[in-house]
Image (spheres, rainbow, N blue to C red):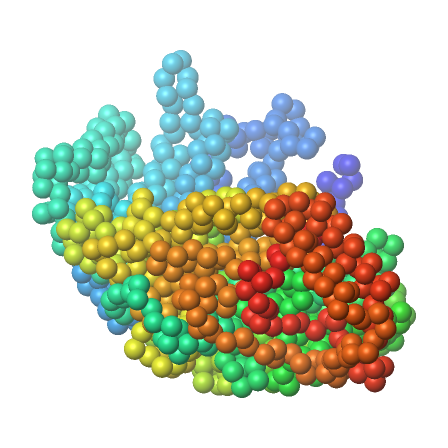
Amino acid sequence: MSLIRSNRWVQSALLLIGLFFTLLLIAPGIFVEYLWLGELGYTSVFWTKIGFQVTLFGFVLLIAGLYFGTNIALFMKRLPPYWAQQFSGGDDGGPQMGGKPLTEGRLRRLGFGLASVFTLLFATGFTGRWNELLRYWHAQPYGRTDPLFGNDLGFYMLELPFIQSLQSGFVGLVFLGLLILVTGYVLVGAIGVRNGQLQLRPASIQHIGVNVMLLLLGWAWGFYLDRYELLLERSGTVFGANYTDINVVLPALWVMIGMTFMLIVLVGLNLKRFRFRLVSYGIGLYVLVLIASLVAAPSIVDQVRVVPNELQVEEPYIEHNIEFTREAFGINNVVKREYPARTELDPDELRDNDDVVRNIRLWDPRLLVDTYVQLQQIRLYYQFYEVDVDRYVIDGEYRQVMLSPRELTQQLPSGSDTWFNRHLQYTHGYGAVMNLVAREGIEGSPEFLMRDLPPQVADSTLEVDKPGIYYGSRTSTYRIAPSSAEELDYPAGDENVYTTYTGNGGILLDSFWKQLLMAYYMGDYNIVLSQYLNEESRIQIWNNVSERVERVAPFLNFDEDPYFVVNNKRQYWIQDAYTASRSFPYSETVEGHGRYNGMQYIRNSVKMVVDAYDGDVGLYIVDPDDPIVQTYASAFPGLFQEFDEMGPGIRRHVRYPQDLFELQVDKLNRYHMQRAQVFYNNEDLWTRPIENYDGRQMRMEPYYIMTRLPGEDELQFMLMTPVTPDNRDNMIAWIAARSDPPNYGEIVTYNLPKDRLIYGPNQIESRIDQDPEISQQIALWDQRGSSVLRGNLIVVPIEDSFLYVEPIFLIADNIRIPQLQRVIVSYDEFVVMERTLNQALNTIFGEEVIEAEGSVVAQMQDSPEQPIDLSGAPGVTAENIGEARRLVQEAREALQDGDFAAFGERFNDLESLLEEEIEVPTAPASAPADTSAPVDTSAVPPASQTPPPPSPEQ
């Protein structure tokens, strides 16, 4: 032990070893990120980010190093005299450190070593604020000023946060230095208590006094910046500076700035001769003025002047609050229209809107994913995670669809979860599943437009050349492709089809050092040891879409739901990205929205497109007026592209993001009131409605819908939600955000008449519950091995009126395959439940208003199903036909009465009759029937002519 301490070269070697291991921890990640961004063509992002991090690190390292170093040097010069005697006193009786005498040199090295450690820690911690420095350095103007100080709003959004970080960092640095100095002087005896009296050495007091002056200077700077904070915080009923802030708090802050400088002067005057009583009086006066000006005075003015006359004195500031909040959340240009909510919808008007009816969403995304898993997952190593809603042109018609990619599972089945399978053979998902939102196939399942492996499609526009999904929404680990091992492409019966990756996604492992680097970084040395890798092998890391876009643009905020798109024979993910700020004058902060809480400004300025096969990432600016995105475009030239540069096919699938819409709706619920008095009294406060889902009352989520807005001819894909008055269930308005060009991003609010009741979703739910026939039928199904689940209630605006549509699903307890069994439609005072949407509308309007739609998936079948000719078949007689009809009728009656045992008996008798008495010839072998092909249930006869389906148990 003593040998190590006594040898300088050993200590230096240990220092070098420490630095080596530090670099070993940091450098590989930096190199990997450089290689990864280089493969995507975004090395400029890497160098810009590193440049700002190094600049900030170097700046803080210099300032902190000078501060700590200077203080340590002064500390050493101001040691009490007896320490010099101790240093020269030899080994006897002197202080010890590590078993050796504490010399001046060793103490100095210890001090500067601690200073170096604190400097490094401080500089490293500050490096994380590189984004604030970047925004400050490249700040772009907003083009509008605040009403109090006249500063451009871009100053608050882009510059003020970094200035505040510098101020808090300066105060923290000096406070830490003071803490170290006071502790050091106490330890060496320069400060202490002797004989009941405080003993202070003048040299140490001077040293500490200078640092106290620096701390007070930082406080004065903080008071100055607090002026701007008045515009960013809630003050009573107003968000932003109110009457008291401007007339009391703002002058008080200037007073405190003056008092702080007076205290700095007082401390300076006492550096040579410390007068404890004078300093104490100064500090006491400072605290007294602080409490009086910033605590007592505002409270008194509030109670005496504001509270008795609040609306009168706060009105101009309430107007600022309304105006700037609407500006900050992009709701200042909302189009307001009136919606009569007629109850005299004519059948001819409904026929004219048959395209709207055919696009009413019946399938619930939360349930449909279970159906996909059961019917289309195919193998255990595939998984459907979520269902997206989009629109496509199918067979020449604009249709709303639901789709989900068939991704690779995050965990391979037990027994096959080996390193070889996990990283080399099971490398990708395959294809997607798609269905129309308002159609069902056989037995209550969806009518698929895309299905099976290899993918079968209903329209040539849905074909994909390379269905492999190497980059997904839940990809959990890295993959290596291509390699000498064949990759599983998709199963084909008892055999598997294999492939080799031909894309350019991933870091090319064309040298040993790259393999070694990736093995070290991933903590997996099989990358080096495996013989399957070759010069064309690529390692695909950060292949989860969300992680991928965050690595490319770490300065943006991201929507929770990237959605899947099929376009031009390729597969993509579209990720909505937001620019945001927590500093926007007079804007109310976001609350109750998780990751968005605290934001005062947000824009969906960027759309990111990720290729599911190659992993290429494109960033497109959709809001060029946003100063934040222009700031980043200035800092990262070449990173962003104009929205017009996005492929036209992809642009047709851009949709308004739900996260942003929910934020805007929550703000509109209050900030649609633009008169200060109405706003102050909350006279017309809105809220999102309550719906009954799965037996629970929950807040209704916005939903995508295709409809035709009043006065317009084109069918529009939009995101909408009804709203109700606060603490009421009747509908007061509905809000829609358009997704189709050329009106993308336009928000429209339709206000409903206030002189009569317009049913809200929860009231419709109650009317459904109160209908005896519907309740009885649901109760019959909701037993004996199955359960009934009522899906999303959809409010459909159509021809200045509303249709309310709710699907009914039947789910077996043993196998969760939700089947669409009934559709409930409410209009005016009617509530009807029928087998199909068309039947329900026909029942309500008393005539056939919507014709049955032919199947659009006939081309997915190998050939048309050939009808079976029963004429002349053995055993076919009038008596047999009559007996079959009788059994069908008895079975229908038993099922309607809920007598499932009798239903089963009649069904078995009918089956025996068909098998034993009647010989039914099979279809010709040249034209096999495709039993998996969906049928158009809109053509099914009304419920009065066809018995209800049995429960899944039967």
- Image position of 238 (left or right of 63): left
Q: Looking at the rendering, which quadrant does residue 534 occupy? A: bottom right
- Residue at 64%, 72% in the rendered image: 935
Could you tell me which quadrant the N terminus lies in? top right
Q: Percent position (x, y) of residue 548?
A: 61, 67
Q: Is residue 22 visible?
A: no
* Residue at x 31% of width, y 69% of height: 800
Q: Quadrant of residue 175?
A: top left
- In the image, residue 800 sits, relative to residue 173, either above or below, namely below
- Out of 442 and 367, give the one closest to the viewer: 442
Q: Taking 534 as reference, is 403 left or right?
A: left
Is residue 906 in view from this perspective?
A: yes
x, y percent for residue 39: 66, 77
Task: Relative to 291, say whether 583 is above or below.
Answer: below
Q: Residue at x 50, y 50 (%)?
A: 774
From the viewer's perspective, is 462 left or right of 517?
Answer: left
Please tell me which residue lies in front, 878 or 246.
Answer: 878
User: What residue appears at the point 34 percent right and 43 percent down from the top-left corner?
Assistant: 215
Q: Which of 561 and 772 lies nearest the eye of the viewer?
A: 772
